[in-house]
Amino acid sequence: MAGQMLLGLSILVGLHEFGHFATAKYFKIRVDKFYIFFDFLFPMPGVMNFALLKKKIGDTEYGLGWFPLGGYVAIHGMIDETTDADQLSAEPQPNEFRSKPAWQRLIVMLGGIIMNVITGIIIFSALTFKYGEEYLPATEVKYGVLPNELGQKIGFRTGDKIVKINGRPFTEFDDVYKPDVLIGKNGYYTVHRGGQLVDIRVPVDFMDQLSDKSQTPFVLPLNPFEVDKINSGSPAAKAGLQTGDQILQVGGQDTRFFPQLQEALKANAGKATPLLVKRGAETLTLTANIDDDGKLGFMPKSLLRSSTRTYGLVESVPVGTKKAFGVITTQLTAFGKIFRGEASARKSLGGPMAIAQQYGGQWDWEHFWLLTGMLSMVLAFMNLLPVPALDGGHVMFLLYEMVAGRKPSDAFLENAQKVGMVLILGLMVFVIFNDAIKAIF
């Protein structure tokens, strides 16, 4: 998990800082440093100054810092986390950031955000081109759904067939999980139950409830399945399961559908448990020592037929762009719910541990790039927030300068920078401790 997170964030931070670096160089602004991670104890530029690797090329020192939290470019003549107003007391030089027109400085400050947006679009477009879009047609979910505890709480029942979302028919089952119904306003599902149509309303605090029950979706399709690939040395292999077997019961509990199997395995975790298995025309009873995590160690093959949409290279770009900006739309909706008091910041915000958990414990490159693309768009969104010390704070002051015709004093910018750093550090402490509390409790 940690390796994937560090790799993903290193790529994104490097590209973000390259956006600032490239635009600064284009406008002939000197860049003193370009670092992945910090070569000091962030946010104190004078404490514990050393780099793991560094090399000076021209005016710029390129390096890998020891403190694995982001990275930076030190742009000459700019007040940021590495510079204060006292270092800028001399007259501005032609190659300094502060000597350039406001519109050029604005482009430099937007360079990192633009780079993250471009990266997100490229990643989503490339994934769309390579893998297409696999989806489960809604018509295939003919056995209905199996809700977990949260699904039952809001009104779903086992076997419910979802026929409409927000009053409209839908064609893909994944639409059930889309943000416009889960965290939008007045979302609801219409299900067919016992010959009647029943509306199930989505509570306004559903985002919080999802955070509490994030391990599994609140409803899963009831899908019949068979055993596919079996892990060598796993409980499934030792029990004698074979590819193509259908597990009918676990410990006497019916497991015709895969979500039922998952529940039955968790209920019998760490136990020697009888399995009723259909193999061809035979019905066998095997005994499996289910591991402590409630796993047998095989890949299931769903007997519901999924479909795949394929795209050409040119077609993939608008589809990938829409997916990329959909991440930002979701972020805006989620922040809106937090600010309106409809969702808890504690339950909704996550830090490094939460990111690592999202990457997962195995290297799956499709999942790695999908999550990295999402993080790229999230970083672009977060950096655009009008908070001093973030790119958005610099953008806010530059827009003020362009409208008012005069820029704030260096002392004001330095103080604003300090306030912004306090806010950011406070948020960092909050999310890190929040992650730890979630992991423990």
Image: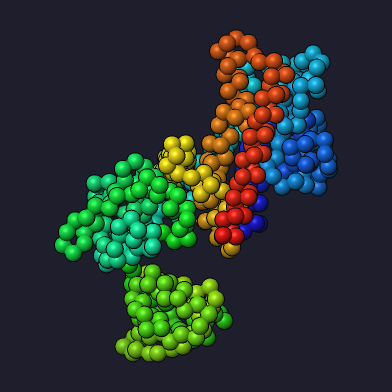
Q: Is residue 184 above or below residue 411?
A: below
- In the rendered view of the protein, which quadrant contains the C terminus? bottom right
Q: Is residue 435 above or below residue 415?
A: below
Residue at 50 percent of width and 77 percent of height: 269
x and y, in percent, of residue 150 in the image: 39, 59
Q: Is residue 114 left or right of residue 240?
A: right
Q: Is residue 351 visible?
A: no
x and y, in percent, of residue 386 in the image: 57, 28
Q: Is residue 405 above or below residue 299?
A: above
Residue at 43 percent of width and 80 percent of height: 243
Nearer the observer, 52 or 194: 194
How many numbered callouts?
0
Residue at 80 percent of width and 30 percent of height: 59
Residue 42 image-quadrant placement: top right
Residue at 81 percent of width and 44 percent of height: 51
Outermost residue toward the left? 195
Residue 152 image-quadrant placement: bottom left
- In the rendered view of the protein, which quadrant contains the N terminus? bottom right
Q: Is residue 17 left or right of residue 354?
A: right
Nearer the observer, 373 or 386: 386
x and y, in percent, of residue 41 in the image: 78, 42
The colour scheme applied to this rendered structure is: rainbow
Q: Is residue 337 visible?
A: yes
Nearer the observer, 61 or 396: 396
Residue 183 image-quadrant placement: top left
x and y, in percent, of residue 179 in the image: 39, 46
